[in-house]
Each structure stands twice: as structure tokens, then as C-alpha cells.
Image (cartoon, rainbow, N blue to C red):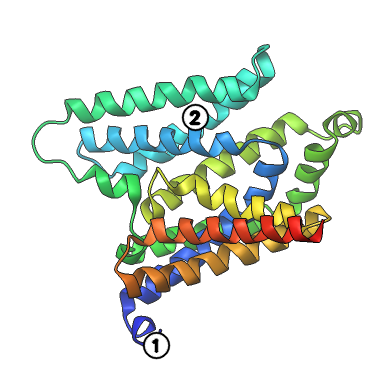
């Protein structure tokens, strides 16, 4: 453990992982409670389409992933509000569109392009200083939006009453979807498009099993998210395993422990 911490790249990985886990876990409570876990997968694949566009144009992939993911997030919210379609149907449509679009862009890329594998699976141990600053900016954005968590929670548990109280629910839905999109794009470089949704969903799902109140659920989600990053990174370093995948496996192990605890308590 001490050997791992002595390396600058491990220090950057640990700090970036903790920052991403804090931002994602705080949002995960809303995603799980609103039954929007599929949203994380949909937006992660939208981020992949943006990355593929950036690779096709030989530009910075994440610079294209951010606007594409935000547009897809807003499109999902718009389809849910303006049509008779359910949210999971809207997500499924744009999910498939994003994957197909990404495949087309990658197939049309000529010559050498950056390895898309890294954007699919990420690498916490390869975090660069600029990725660290992006993760810090994401956490600061979350702190800036903290006063809105009350309105988001109100609409999460009783949407009709929130509308009756003239809470701008639709505005908050768009804002929450946008923040989820931004957090996923920032985390893509760290854990990859295929695994990033796990940071959003698994700690919050485990916290849901352990918590009688929503406030406790958010606190448990933050604690489990950070714990999974720490344990997963040390296991990854010690066993020479992929860092992002190892963290997700630890998250899943924590979820199973939470499930067993609830079963034994019952």
C-alpha cells in the first residue's frame, strides 16, 4: 500500500477516482430513486458517439463528447415530456442511435486515430493532470448545484405535488439530466464509456438497501463510492488488473454485501 501511494501516477488516480466517485454517487441517489438507471447506459453510449466523432475529425474526443451527450440527455427529457413514450423507450431509441452513429464515425476514420479502446474501458492509473482538473471542476459544479438538491428530491418523491406547488419541475429535470451528462463525460476518460454508468448506479443501489431515508441514502452512496475506488485501485495495483474494471467489481461486491445484510436483517 505504501509503495503504491509513493507513485505520482497512483496519487493522481486515487484523487481523480475519489472526485469522480463523489460527484457520481451524489447523483446516483436521484437516478436510482427515479428508476433512471438505464439513463446512465444511454448517456455513456452517447459519449462514445461523441468520442468517435472527435476521433473521426482528429480532434480532442471529449470536446465533442460533451455537447453530444448533453444534447442526447436533453433529447431524452424532451421526448418523455412531449410524447406518450416512456422514458426508457426514449432512452432506448437514442441509445441505439448513438451506438450506430459512433460505429459509422469510427468506420470512416482514415489513417491513424487514437485507440478507442481506452475510451471504452478507461484507465484510472493513466489519469493525466488535465483529467484531474476536469474531475475537480465536476465536483465544484456539484457543490454549486447543491442548493437545488431539495427541489430535485421533492420532484423525485412527489412530482405532482411539486408541480402543484409551482416548482419548475421541467427546468429541474433538464438541469439534472445535463449534470448527469457532464459527469459521465468527465468520468469516461477515467473509467471508460462501458463502465462509467456503474459509478452512477451501483453505489447508490447498495445505499438504497441500507438506508431508511433519502438523506442517509446519499451519504451511504458517497461513502461506498469512495471506498470502492480506494479498495479497487489498491487491488488493481497489487494484482495487475484493469483499474476501472476492478473498481466496478468492488462496487458490485459492496452491493452484494448490502443485499446480504438486508436479507439477514429480515
Task: Point out the residue furthest to the left here.
Answer: 111
**Picture quarter with the N terminus:** bottom left
Mark count: 2
Circle 2 Cα neighbour tier, 10 Å, few/some/many (<14 / 14–19 / ≥20): some
What residue is rendered at 30% in x and 63% in y?
Answer: 126
Q: Is residue 65 visible?
A: yes
What residue is rendered at 51% in x and 59% in y?
Answer: 20
**Picture quarter with the C terminus:** bottom right
Q: Is residue 244 left or right of residue 71?
A: left
- Compared to residue 226, the image places residue 185 above or below, namely above
The residue indicated by pointer 2 is 71
* Secondary structure of the residue carrying numbered label 2: helix
Q: Quadrant of residue 264?
A: bottom right
Residue 257 spot, x, y in % from top left? 63, 61
Q: Earlier in the sequence, mark 2 or mark 1?
A: 1
What residue is rendered at 38% in x and 49% in y?
Answer: 192
What residue is rendered at 46% in x and 26% in y?
Answer: 95
Q: Is residue 140 visible?
A: no
Residue 131 spot, x, y in % from top left? 38, 60
Residue placed most toward the observer, 169 or 35: 35
Residue placed most toward the observer, 2 or 62: 2
Residue 23 spot, x, y in % from top left? 58, 57
The residue indicated by pointer 1 is 2
- Compared to residue 198, the image places residue 224 above or below, namely below
Amino acid at each position: 500500500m505504501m509503495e503504491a501511494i509513493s507513485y505520482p501516477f497512483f496519487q493522481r488516480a486515487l484523487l481523480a477516482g475519489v472526485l469522480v466517485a463523489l460527484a457520481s454517487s451524489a447523483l446516483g441517489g436521484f437516478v436510482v430513486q427515479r428508476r433512471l438507471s438505464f439513463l446512465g447506459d444511454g448517456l455513456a453510449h452517447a459519449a462514445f458517439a461523441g468520442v468517435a466523432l472527435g476521433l473521426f475529425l482528429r480532434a480532442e474526443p471529449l470536446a465533442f463528447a460533451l455537447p453530444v451527450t448533453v444534447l442526447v440527455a436533453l433529447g431524452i427529457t424532451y421526448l418523455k415530456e412531449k410524447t406518450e413514450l416512456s422514458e426508457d423507450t426514449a432512452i432506448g431509441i437514442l441509445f441505439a442511435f448513438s451506438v450506430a452513429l459512433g460505429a459509422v464515425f469510427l468506420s470512416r476514420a482514415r489513417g491513424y486515430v487514437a485507440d478507442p479502446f481506452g475510451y471504452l474501458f478507461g484507465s484510472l492509473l493513466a489519469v493525466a493532470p488535465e483529467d484531474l482538473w476536469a474531475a475537480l471542476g465536476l465536483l465544484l459544479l456539484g457543490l454549486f448545484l447543491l442548493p437545488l438538491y431539495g427541489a430535485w428530491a421533492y420532484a423525485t418523491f412527489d412530482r405532482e405535488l411539486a408541480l402543484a406547488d409551482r416548482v419548475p419541475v421541467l427546468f429541474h429535470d433538464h438541469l439534472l439530466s445535463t449534470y448527469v451528462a457532464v459527469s459521465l463525460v468527465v468520468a469516461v476518460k477515467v473509467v471508460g464509456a462501458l463502465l462509467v454508468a456503474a459509478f452512477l448506479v451501483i453505489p447508490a443501489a447498495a445505499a438504497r438497501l441500507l438506508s431508511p431515508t433519502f438523506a442517509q441514502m446519499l451519504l451511504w452512496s458517497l461513502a461506498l463510492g469512495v471506498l470502492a475506488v480506494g479498495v479497487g485501485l489498491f487491488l488493481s495495483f497489487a494484482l495487475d488488473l484493469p483499474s476501472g474494471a476492478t473498481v466496478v467489481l468492488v462496487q458490485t461486491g459492496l452491493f452484494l454485501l448490502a443485499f446480504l445484510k438486508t436479507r439477514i436483517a429480515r
